[in-house]
Amino acid sequence: MSVPLILTLLAGGATFVGALFGIIGQKPSNRLLAFALGFAAGIMLLISLMEMLPAALHTPGMSPMLGYGMFMFGLLGYFALDRMLPHQHPQDLVQKPLKPLNLKRTAILLTLGISLHNFPEGIATFVTASADLELGMGIALAVAMHNIPEGLAVAGPVYAATGSKTKALFWSGISGLAEILGGVLAFVLLGPMISPVVMASIMAAVAGIMVALSVDELMPLAKEIDPHNNPSYGVLCGMAVMGFSLTLLQSGGIG
C-alpha cells in the first residue's frame, strides 16, 4: 500500500476519534474544538498558497494561465458544490431542544453533508502526498484535526437520538469512509503513470479547494462553535507551526 494512501486512511480514520468523544468520556470544550478548526484552516491556507500553488506553477511545461485557471476551478467548484449541500452544524443541535425523530433526521443530514465534503478532502490528501510527501503529511494532519470535531458532531446527536453507541460509530464511520473512498478513487484513476503537468493541474485545483474549505467552512464554523473567541488565533498558530515545520524540513534540520 502506498504512503499517500496510508496518510489518507489515517486522516479519514480520525473521524472515529471524534466519534469516541461523542459516546465515551467527557466532550472536548467548544473552545478547544474551535481552536482545532482554526488551526487546521491555518495549515491548509499556508500549504495551499505558499507551497502547492507555487509548486504547480513552476512545474516544467505548466503555463500560468492553466495553473491559475485550475486554481480558480477548484475554488469556484467547491463553492458551487457547497451551496448544494445540506448544512447542519453541531451547534444547531444544542441551541434548541429537538425531538428524537427530528434529532435523528438532523444527524443523518449532518452525516450526508460531512460525507460529501470529506470526499474531495480524501482526493486532496492523496494527490498532495503523491506530489510531495512532506506537504501531504501537513494536509493529512490538518484534515485529521478537523475530522475529530466532525466525528463528534455526527456521533453525539445519533447517540442522543437512538441511545446506541454502535449506530453512532456507524454513522460517523460513513462520513470518514467517504474521505477514504476519495483517496482510493484518486489512487485508482491517477496511478503511477500520470504526467507532471496533469499532476500540477490537479494540485492547483486542490489548492483552490483547500482555500475555499478553510475560508467558507472551517473558520466560520469555528466562530459559530465558540463565538466568544477569535478563530484567527488558531489560524495564525496553524500557519506558524506549519511554516516553522516546513522551514526545518527544507533546510535539512529534520530528516
Image: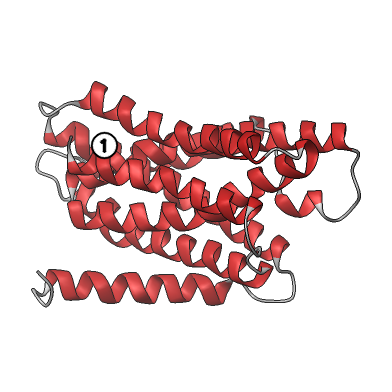
Q: Is residue 178 above or below residue 236?
A: above
Please provide percent x and percent y for residue 44: 40, 58
Q: Is residue 231 something one can see in this rendering? A: yes
For image coordinates 50% across by 47% down, the residue present is 15
Disc 1 crowd rating (10 Å Cα; few below 14, some 14-19, many 20+) is many
For image coordinates 66% across by 69% down, the residue present is 29
Would residue 69 appear left or right of 91 to someone viewing this image? Answer: left
Say which of 118 and 175 sits in front: 175
Please provide percent x and percent y for residue 222: 63, 62
The type of residue carrying mark 1 is: Ser
Please provide percent x and percent y for residue 202: 29, 36
Q: Which residue is mark 1?
A: 201
Please provide percent x and percent y for residue 76: 50, 38
Picture quarter with the C terminus: bottom left
Residue placed furthest toward the top: 189
Q: Quadrant of residue 98?
A: top right
Say which of 122 and 180 sits in front: 180
Say which of 177 and 64 sits in front: 177
